[in-house]
Amino acid sequence: MPVDAAQLWTLNHGLLTVVLDACSAELAELGLEAKEFFVLAEVAASPYPAELAAKLVIPKASVTAYVRNLVAKEFMRREIDDADLRRHRLLLTDAGEAARDGAFAALAKAFDRRLAQVTPHDRAELQRILLALLDPPGGVRAS
């Protein structure tokens, strides 16, 4: 019986949603909403708001709102980019790094509870498959 790609995508999305829901209380204790966590997690690799929006596949207006909230919470700060004085670079504060790291730990704990249902061999196989799926044709991964 062939495997339906749309069903696999839906199952994967459902798993991600369940894991996020399972740690939502811990994220709230850290002062984060789930989408704010994704911004914190990505800002080091994509320090400009437009880059964040593209990387996270969310509207620029939403990124602006999340950044505004994270700056108000003192998890992030804006600074003028020396290379282009018209642009603002986003940087995590120490509190932002701590919140991001705490959120990663909460997500890892919630996901590990799910992974406990599969064998170590299957975990390794899942990792191999996910890495293969993230590797685009031609082997050059975008960042």
Image (cartoon, helix red, strand yellow):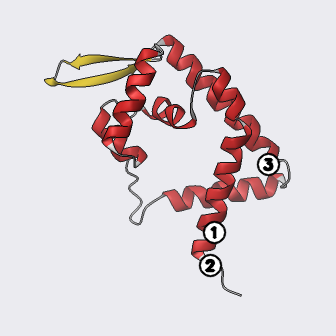
> x, y percentage for residue 46?
36, 35
Q: Nearer the viewer, residue 110 or 65?
A: 65
Q: Which dot marks residue 114?
A: 3
With 60 as the anchor, is 76 left or right in this view? right
In the displayed structure, 95 sits above or below 129; it is above
Label 2 packing within 10 angstroms: few (<14), some (14-19), many (20+): few
Within 10 angstroms of label 3, few (less than 14), some, or many (20 or more) residues? few
Q: Quadrant of the N terminus?
A: bottom right
Q: Where is residue 43 drawn, in percent x and y?
A: 41, 30
Report x, y in % for residue 55. Answer: 38, 45
- Which residue carries the number 2 mark? 4
Q: Secondary structure at mark 1?
A: helix
Asked where in the image residue 52 lies, by quadrant, the reply is top left
**Any part of residue 130 in sight:** yes
Residue 9's place in the image compared with 89, above or below, is: below
* Residues marked 2 and 1 touching at CB (< 8 Å): yes
Residue drawn 63% across the image and 72% down it? 7
Quarter holding the C terminus is top left
Looking at the rendered structure, the kind of residue marked 1 is Leu
Name the residue tied to disc 1. Answer: 8
Asked whether, in this view, residue 5 is left or right of residue 82, the answer is right
* SS at badge 3: helix
